[in-house]
Image: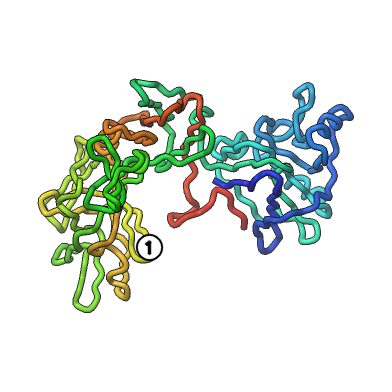
């Protein structure tokens, strides 16, 4: 999500021909907009005392079939700002072609602009040198004075025309469209937009928080804390590494030591189990440890494991679990480095977090935790479940799911400038 700064500050996105970059600055507005008629001009000037001028405007109540030259719709609702940033980009490019020797300014008004639901060119915004203007006559994008627009890669549930059901108490569910992409974050906005967590494993032997007898405890103090702290779960600790032997596992070696990078030993006292949404089954053969469970409707890798190294974090998926020898097998190898053998990949004492186990979600819901969610992908359509906090109603509040993927596996942005 890209957020313009707080009110009374302007963000300028200036694209230069050879080296495009984002510039955050105060800038005088020098270009001139022409309005459709005198009545609309007067109406626009009443919006703000300083009467900001721009070539094009975008507003969440706009329309991509309009001219985009008015900061608000006219009295007849026949003209006004664009509805999407992508449509303003097209208009800007056309104006730039016909008038290359003038400054161009585009202003974005208050609101949230969902890129996946954009009425023009849904998806990632891509700015290239064709959008640049010249160093002397640049193209500038900025927020409308005093307003705070947000560009989002998410889809609001309400904008999809979906309704939540309320099976009981604070438990809510909604069926998602069949073309929904898998997501790992949920944003809930009642007053502020906050991230909601998936269920994380909890253990008194780890570091963090855990539920016991209906109360949340801190492993650091041993005392009870606010129950919402238990949503953070517990950092579990790697019990030990697994030597490669003759398994052929992805491994790393250093000064006579060696370890597999796709598996490690866990503490038998930790709550590791064959969870309901764990598709893989341990075969008994460490060389080919996991096979798919044809009777399990959940996709492979539905449960996520985050392994913390000394300088890196590996975001992994659990393939299967050997509950006899207490080994977790991952769907792929973590990072390894012979020169930093104990810093990269599994190492005894390193911390990890497991989240999105369906069993944990059910247990934590029964224990009284709230603000948790689970995406059930066992059947189509997928079902999103949410345990609401006090005075929350997802049919009234704004709930958004991310639907734009990173540009690369290692990261990316929903707005690209090259």
Residue 131 or residue 14, whichever sits in front: 14
Residue 262 or residue 123, whichever sits in front: 262
Q: Where residue 314 sits: x, y (%)?
A: 35, 58
- Residue 345, quarter of the rendered image: bottom left
Q: Is residue 60 above or below residue 260?
A: above
Classify mark 1: helix, strand or loop: loop
Q: Residues within 10 Å of mark 1 (few under 14, many from 20)?
A: few
Does any portion of residue 250 appear in the rendered image? no
Residue drawn at 22 percent across, 79 percent down? 255
- Residue 117, quarter of the rendered image: top right
Residue drawn at 25 percent across, 64 percent down? 347
Residue drawn at 37 percent across, 39 percent down? 228
Q: Is residue 204 left or right of residue 1?
A: left
Does any portion of residue 127 appear in the rendered image? yes
Q: Where residue 239 sits: x, y (%)?
A: 19, 59
Q: Is residue 261 left or right of residue 85?
A: left
Q: Is residue 225 above or below residue 407?
A: above
* Pointer 1 residue: 312
Number of on-image labels: 1
Q: Where residue 360 sits: x, y (%)?
A: 26, 39
Q: Where residue 76 sits: x, y (%)?
A: 78, 21
Residue drawn at 75 percent across, 31 percent down? 72
Q: Is residue 312 left or right of residue 193?
A: left
Determine the residue located farthest toward the bottom in the rendered image. 255
Residue 252 or residue 343, whichever sits in front: 343
**Quadrant holding the N terminus:** top right
**Quadrant holding the C terminus:** bottom right
Q: Is residue 107 above or below residue 36?
A: below
């Amino acid at each position: 999500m890209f957020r313009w700064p707080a009110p009374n500050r302007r963000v300028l996105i200036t694209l230069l021909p050879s080296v495009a970059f984002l510039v955050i600055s105060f800038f005088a507005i020098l270009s001139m907009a022409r309005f459709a008629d005198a009545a609309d001009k007067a109406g626009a000037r009443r919006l703000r005392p300083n009467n900001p001028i721009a070539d094009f405007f975008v507003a969440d109540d706009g329309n991509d079939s309009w001219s985009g030259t008015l900061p608000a719709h006219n009295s007849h609702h026949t003209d006004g700002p664009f509805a999407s940033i992508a449509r303003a980009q097209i208009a800007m490019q056309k104006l730039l072609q016909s008038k290359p020797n003038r400054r161009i300014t585009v202003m974005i008004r208050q609101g949230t602009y969902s890129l996946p639901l954009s009425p023009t060119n849904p998806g990632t915004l891509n700015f290239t040198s064709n959008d640049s203007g010249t160093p002397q006559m640049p193209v500038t994008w900025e927020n409308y004075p005093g307003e705070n627009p947000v560009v989002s890669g998410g889809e609001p549930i309400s904008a999809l025309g979906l309704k939540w059901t309320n099976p009981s108490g604070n438990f809510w569910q909604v069926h998602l469209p069949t073309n929904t992409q898998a997501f790992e974050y949920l944003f809930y906005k009642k007053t502020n937009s906050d991230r909601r967590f998936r269920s994380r494993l909890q253990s008194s032997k780890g570091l963090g928080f855990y539920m016991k007898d209906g109360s949340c405890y801190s492993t650091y103090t041993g005392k009870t804390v606010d129950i919402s702290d238990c949503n953070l779960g517990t950092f579990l600790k790697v019990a030990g590494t697994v030597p490669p032997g003759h398994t052929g596992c992805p491994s790393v070696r250093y000064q006579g030591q060696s370890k597999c990078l796709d598996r490690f030993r866990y503490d038998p006292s930790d709550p590791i189990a064959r969870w309901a949404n764990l598709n893989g089954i341990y075969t008994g053969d460490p060389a080919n440890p996991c096979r798919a469970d044809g009777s399990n409707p959940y996709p492979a890798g539905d449960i996520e494991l985050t392994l913390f190294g000394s300088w890196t974090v590996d975001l992994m998926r659990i393939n299967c679990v050997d509950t006899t020898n207490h080994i977790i097998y991952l769907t792929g190898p973590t990072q390894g480095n012979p020169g930093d053998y104990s810093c990269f990949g599994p190492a005894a004492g390193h911390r990890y977090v497991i989240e999105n186990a369906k069993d944990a979600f059910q247990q934590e819901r029964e224990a009284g935790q709230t603000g948790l969610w689970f995406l059930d992908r066992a059947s189509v359509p997928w079902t999103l479940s949410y345990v609401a906090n006090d005075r929350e109603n997802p049919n009234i509040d704004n709930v958004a799911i991310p639907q734009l993927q990173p540009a690369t596996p290692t990261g990316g942005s929903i707005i690209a400038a090259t």
